[in-house]
Image: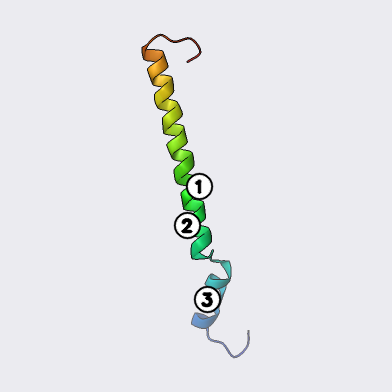
Amino acid sequence: MPGKNKTTRDKERREATMLSKAIQDAINQQINADISSAYLYLSMSAYCAATNRVGS
């Protein structure tokens, strides 16, 4: 990229690889939903184990 200084090139490179705010929010929302589901299933498993349910 002739004519551009290193700072400008670095900034353009970062902007080209960054996800949009909407995509970041969607990914974070999905991660939070997955973590919540994991904790829900873990708590159900712990409850079943504590109450001697079969299949836990």
The residue under label 2 is 25
Q: Position of residue 13 (x, y in %)?
A: 56, 73
Residue 33 in the image: above or below residue 47: below
Pick the residue in front: 5 or 51: 51
| Camera-side mark, 3 or 2 | 2
Q: Tag 1, which secondary structure?
A: helix
Query: Badges 2 and 1: C-beta atoms under 8 Å apart?
Result: no
Q: Position of residue 35 (x, y in %)?
A: 45, 39
Residue 30 in the image: above or below residue 42: below
The residue shown at (59%, 91%) is 3
What's under tag 1, amino acid-wise? Gln
Q: Please indicate whether residue 47 sits to the left or right of residue 1 in the image.
A: left
Q: Which mark is residue 10?
A: 3
Label 3 Cα neighbours within 10 Å, binned few <14 / some 14-19 / many ≥20 = few
The residue shown at (52%, 82%) is 8
The residue under label 1 is 30
